[in-house]
Amino acid sequence: MAVCIEIIQADITTLAVDAIVNAANNTLLGGGGVDGAIHRAAGPQLVTECSALGGCATGDAKLTKGYQLPARYVIHTVGPVWHGGGQGEPQLLQRAYLRCFEVAREHGVKSIAFPAISCGVYGYPLRDAARIALTTAKQVAADDDFQRIIFVPFSEQALQIYQETARRLNL
Ligand code: ADP
C-alpha cells in the first residue's frame, strides 16, 4: 500500500492516530511546549510510565502508552538543541526521526504524527528542520509499510514552510 505523507496544522494532542511523537527533553519527565501539552492531555499516568524509562539520549526514542490521549501510543524523542549547526545537529535530528520510525515499526504502528522536533525552545531553524523531517519520511515511505505519516506544524507560518518544503521535495 502506498504511504501517505500528510501535513496537517493542528494541536497534535487531538489526533486519533496509532502514535504521536513527543519532542521531549532528556529526563522524559515533562517540560513546556508540545511536551507539556501532551502530558496535560494524557493525564498523570504518562509521567509515571516515563519516570521508569531512565531518560532518553538525544537522537533516541522511547515508547509509552497514550493514556487519555486519542492516540494509542506516545513516542518520546529528544532532538538536538540548536548551537548554530556545527555540532552535529542535522545528524542528530535525522537520527531522532529515524528512531521514531524504528520504534513505531517495532510496535506495529501504521499511522504516526510528528511535531516540529527541536523547533521550539531548542531553536532549530524551521526551514532546515522541515527539510530533514520530510526527506527522512520520504526515504522511510519508500520501503516501509506505514499507512499515514503526518507532520503537524502548529502555526500558520510553520504550515507554509512545511508545504513549501514538500513541494520542493516532490511529495
Ligand atoms: P523543542 O524543545 O524540541 O524545541 P517545543 O515543544 O519547544 O520542543 O517545540 C517543538 C514544536 O512544537 C514547536 O514548533 C512548537 O510550535 C510546536 N508545538 C507546541 N505545542 C504543540 C501542540 N500542541 N501540537 C503540535 N505542535 C506543538
Image (cartoon, helix red, strand yellow):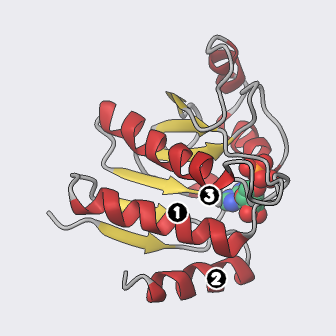
Instruction: Name the residue: 55% across, 71% down.
Output: 131
At 44% from the left and 67% from the top, the residue drawn is 135
Q: Is residue 30 left or right of residue 128?
A: right
Residue at horizontal 80 percent and vertical 58 percent from the top? 120
Task: Give coordinates of residue 138: x percent, y percent.
Answer: 35, 66
Which circle marks residue 115 in the picture? 3
In the rendered image, which residue does mark 2 sit on? 161
Residue under the point 66% across and 35% down: 58
Classify the position of ligand 1 by quadrant: top left, top right, bottom left or bottom right. bottom right
Q: Which label's residue is closer to the chain start, 1 or 2? A: 1
Q: Residue furthest front?
A: 86
Image: 137 above or below 164:
above
Q: Is residue 145 above or below residue 57?
A: below
| Secondary-structure class at tag 2 | helix
Alpha-carbon neighbours of circle 3 within 10 Å: few (<14), some, or many (≥20)? many
Rendered image: mark on residue 133: 1
